[in-house]
Structures are given as structure tokens and as C-alpha cells.
Image (tube, rainbow, N blue to C red):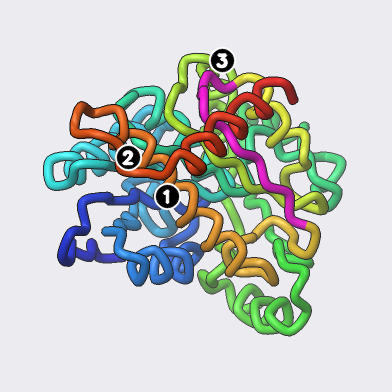
Amino acid sequence: MPYFPPAQNRDHAVLLLHGLSSSPLELRFLARYLGEEGFATHTPELPGYSAGAGHASMEEWLRAAVAEFDALAARHRHVSVCGLSMGAALAAAVAHERPSARALLLLSVTLDYDGWAIPWYRFLLDWAYYTPLRTRYRYREHEPYGLRNEALRTKIARAMQKGEISEVGPASISMPALHEASRLAASVRGKLKRVTSDCLVIHAIDDETSSPHNARFVAANIGASFLRTIWLDDSYHMITSDNEREVVARECTMFLRESASACDSTDGTGPVMSRALARRLRQTAAGAKRA
């Protein structure tokens, strides 16, 4: 997805990272919503990570994502990072490499494929990577395709049967990509305590791909002092496309504004938010730490 340059007073950019072997289509609704709310957005395709971009290691994924962050940082005062699914793990890795990230938005964060629709043999794929199956096997997506919305699920099923890239991801994922994703997730689990950017976690309680344990693990281990966790009850994994996509977009917008306002109030230029908002931010952060 192309970069949308800043409009008037648009000094806050958001780097949006889609899921594994997928495309910016997954984040189209959110990107449009944020753009209408005054944010500059950029949803890049990354070499070796995005659909049709070949194969690369997770280190190369991270280098490419950090380069995209740096390009935004050269043009904007604030840069935040948002990721969906494995893209959320990649976003956390970027925030670790770039502590200047204003906010970190983790949507359906995936540090382990442990949802209720994941096949029992999923754990064997890490072993199979070291066999001849490595170049032959592809994990095929299946219903419910991350969607609770049945009408949209039917539409996506037709695209999947044709092997097309849809707004909820690819029809299949290669074994090397899954292997690198597992390496990325393991790396992020060990770095969370050193990620200090303001953090918003949004996760569906019925996520069929990554169980709520993923979100709870992040909330319990991330080093952010300002943390908010939101649970959805009418969506599956693809929360940027499912029934509550507007809720997701609104909450992301609100969090980005609160994070930037909290930063502006302490930069020596004087307060720019009300006392009530400042009190709310402190109470939210204190409650998250106790949870």
C-alpha cells in the first residue's frame, strides 16, 4: 500500500505491519480510518515477508521494517507501530529496536499458534522443517478464516479456493515462512521487558489462531508504563476485518492521541491536555500494572 503523505498538522505517522505471507489488504480499513482521523499511514510490503516476496530470514524482515520506521521518523515528529497477527510480533521487535516509537499497537498478537482451530499436528511442523518436506509442504488456511462474520467468511472462502490473496490473508503459507515466524516469536518473548513504548493490546476472546494467552503474556511481560488491553467478544482472529473492526479502529485512534498528548505535556512546552485526561492516563497505567 502506498505511503499517504501528511496533510495539514499531520505530524503523527503510523507504520502498519500485516500478517505473515499476506498483504496490506488486511489493514486497509484501519489505514483508511486513521488517515481520515489525521494520521499519516504507511503499510509496506516487506521483502521475504509479504505475499509473493520470496523467502527471507526473520532478521531480514526486521531490518526491512526498521528501515520503513526510520524513513517515517525522518518526516514526522511521532511514529507509532501497529501490527496484526505475526505482524504484531514484528511490530514489537521494531519497538525494541527503536525505543523512540511513540506507541505500539498489537492486534491479535501471535507469539504462539495455539488457538482452537489450529490442527493438533501444528507442533510437528517445526520438526518437519528439517526434513525434505521443507520445500514441499504448505499450511493451507481453512474455515473460519479468522472471521466470525459469516457473510464475509463465504466471500473469503471463494477467494481461498482460487488460491488468491484476500483481505484476511493468503490461501497457504510455506513451511520456511512458518519456521521464521516461530523464530521471530521466540525472539520477541525474550525482549518484551525491554519494550517501553506505550502499548495497546486488542485481542478477541474467541481467537481461533492465537489464544488469549498471547495477549495476557504480553500484558504481563512488556516494559511499557502505559498499557491498555481490550478484549473483543464478537470477532475471531482477523479483528481488522471482522464484526468489530470499527471498534478496533476507534480504540487505536484514541490510544494514539492519548499517547501523543501525554508526550506533549512533558516536552517543556506546557500542558496540552486536561487534568481529567492526565488523571485517566495515570489510573489506566496503574491498573494495568496491578492486573
Magenta residues (range): 222-232
**Residue 140, image x, y percentages:** 68, 58
Residue at mark 3: 190
Front residue of this view, candidates 5 and 261:
261
Mark 3 vs 2: CB contact within 8 A:
no
Q: Residues within 10 Å of mark 1 (few under 14, many from 20)?
A: many
Going by the numbered disc 2, the residue's amino acid type is Ala
Residues at marks 1 and 3, CA–CA distance in whole angstroms: 21 Å
**Residue 3, image x, y percentages:** 23, 62
Q: Secondary structure at mark 2?
A: helix
Residue at 80% over, 48% down: 118
**Could you tell whether 135 is left or right of 271 in the image?**
right
Residue at 67% over, 67% down: 244
**Could you tell whether 147 is left or right of 71 in the image?**
right
Q: Is residue 66 above or below residue 195?
A: below
Q: Secondary structure at mark 3?
A: helix
Residues at marks 2 and 1, CA–CA distance in whole angstroms: 8 Å
Residue at mark 1: 17
